[in-house]
Image: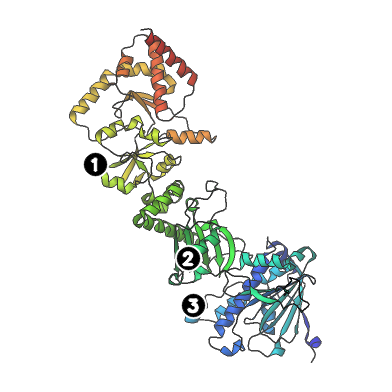
Amino acid sequence: MTAEVNKETLGFQTEARQLLHLMIHSLYSNKEIFLRELISNASDAVDKLRFAALSNDALLEGDGDYAVRVDVDQDAGTVTISDNGIGMNREEVIDHLGTIAKSGTAAFLEQLSGDQQKDSQLIGKFGVGFYSSFIVADRVAVHTRKAGAPANEGVLWESHGESEFTIEPQEKTDRGTSITLFLRDDCKDFADDWRVRSVIKKYSDHISVPVLMKEAAMPAADDAGAEQDAEPPEAQYKPINEATALWTRSRSEVTEEEYSAFYKHVSHDFEEPLSWSHNRVEGKLEYTSLLYIPARAPFDMWNRDANRGVKLYVHRTFIMDDAEQFLPMYLRFVKGVLDSNDLSLNVSREILQQDKTVDVLRSALSKRVLDMLSKMAKNESEKYAAFWKEFGQVLKEGPAEDASNKDKIADLLRFSSTHTDKDIQDQSLRDYIERMQEGQDKIFYVVAENFNTARRSPQLEVFRKRGIEVLLLCDRVDDWLMNHLQEFDGKQLQDVARGRLDLDDENEEDKQAREAAEKDSEGLIERLKSVLGEDVEEVRVTTRLTDSPACLVVGEQDMGAQMRRIMEAAGQAVPESKPILEINPTHPLISRLDSETDEQRFGDLAKIIFDQANLAEGGQLDDPAAYVERLNSLLLQLSNG
């Protein structure tokens, strides 16, 4: 019986020409994806043979050197991907290539059970990828032979990617599958050697099987440098995927130098990483992660639209460069790799579908990074200080974005404090609690535009007098952070410039003196309210000040002054609120104000005191010229006696 007699023309089992057209022209957005898909399928075929040969080594046919070969022919306009894997017989060709979305690997796994199934976990589970061939080709030929079958049982499958395909016997001496793509006129660039190499490096650099391409040897030359007339040496196949899937190896097998080199490969960073965590999880959800903490912040760290996230692989095949779904925004500096077979990709494997698995992986990786940072903070304080200098402000976004890990993040935060009075952020909330005075039940902090403004804030005077530590917050994110943090280890966080201050340690003598001062100042307070009018919400006697004449505080439920300034600068609408002016009746300037009988001078002096209180807490004056005019007038009056 001749081959022509056995040649058949069959219709796709789905009998859906429109569906196939949709898959070819709409399913994949990037044409170069076809190489990833076909090389991934070839790698799967090799893995299946490797597994099957464990129980039947005759399938190897004396050739145990597994490989995937890619050949390009620019003149003919073809690309050929060949493997020496498990191959297919006639029935399997019809079954797998004649049915859209039929996965031969999935059927292979269904036949396994027990330990066999666990041992075969390296084998992929993709079936649709073959049809990506028709993105770039107007005809595809598949020549295959099942491992262990005689050479005359080879099969040739051909299709133009429409409603039909042909299948016929064709002898094949070597096992495995060879797929030849006859490129469309507008896709002939994929017959270029350099173009194909670059795509393989991008998507298939870490698969376990060598991907080979011909590399022509340099012609020999004589002593004078001229080429000899001898025949040039035959082109040799050399591997393209030089990198190894380092994350698939055991941690004990990988050296620090290899981890460091791999970091530079995935991050394109020239510096050594600060730390890394290599972890493999098995069970209901199986995945491998290799996460790195860089030593330096990237230049675009504050661009929240910049590319971020880990590199996503499935079965060592590259899927996505910046898979941002697996880490929250406040951990956007983390680099690394995630490899999992349990993810729900769309059929083109270009889009990651949102499901519970993504959420579980996101939670697991977030905790992994926070645990890594916790160990660094506990055991390598100098290294953690270097991390905090680069990424501390980003980590401060965490409590607002990740409520489930709020306590872990809070334990990692570092601040300046009146304990050291230095602008280095090296004090933790736990350090603060250990130094708290007996009976103190709150963690006090002050927020300002910069460190010096915070350190010299008049609101700190009573705290310094009583030896109570106050955190000095001057990063732009701090006010927002504290609005979401609110408490740590059972201790409430209290802004010293918000609401009424009650330190709960006032003795009876001080209490009587304060109440007497409030009573004596009732007339002054009424005069100040009359002058300041709509500029203030309230005027009252302070419990905060010892050396300054006055200060401004915000209401218990009002937005902080720093957050208000940030939102106004960004053009955001802010709720209307007015500050509270607290005065210190024992200060000479307030006493002088109280005794002033000239209402014009009283008004000028009252507004100067109000403006100075505004300046002392880092604010800006609505009318600086009016302030200067009033101050100059008073100076002239004083100079004239």
Compared with 105, 426 (above or below) is above
Label 3 element class: helix
* Residue 471 position within the rendered picture, expressed as x and y whole percent measured from the top left: 34, 40
Mark 3 or mark 2: which comes first in sequence?
Answer: 3
Viewed as shown, does residue 571 lie left or right of 541?
right
- The residue under label 2 is 257
In the rendered image, the vertical position of residue 489 relative to residue 134, given as above or below: above
Q: Is residue 403 left or right of residue 49?
A: left
- Asked if residue 418 lies left or right of residue 70, the reply is left
Q: Secondary structure at mark 2?
A: helix
Proximity of marks 3 and 2: CB atoms separated by less than 8 Å? no
Amino acid at circle 2: Glu
Q: Quadrant of residue 611?
A: top left
Q: Residue at x 46, y 49 (%)?
A: 391
Quadrant in which the N terminus appears = bottom right
Name the front one of labels 1 and 2.
2
Query: Residue 29 at what x, y percent from top left?
Result: 68, 60
The percent position of residue 490, horizontal first and vertical second, equals: 30, 47
Calculate the distance from the C-alpha at mark 3 to the C-alpha at mark 2.
31 Å
Where residue 437 is drawn, which disc sits there?
1
Q: Position of residue 507 (x, y in %)?
A: 19, 31
Mark 3 lies on residue: 118
Query: In front of the other: label 3 or label 2?
Result: 2
Given the image, on which type of amino acid does mark 1 rest?
Gln
Numbered disc 1: secondary structure: loop
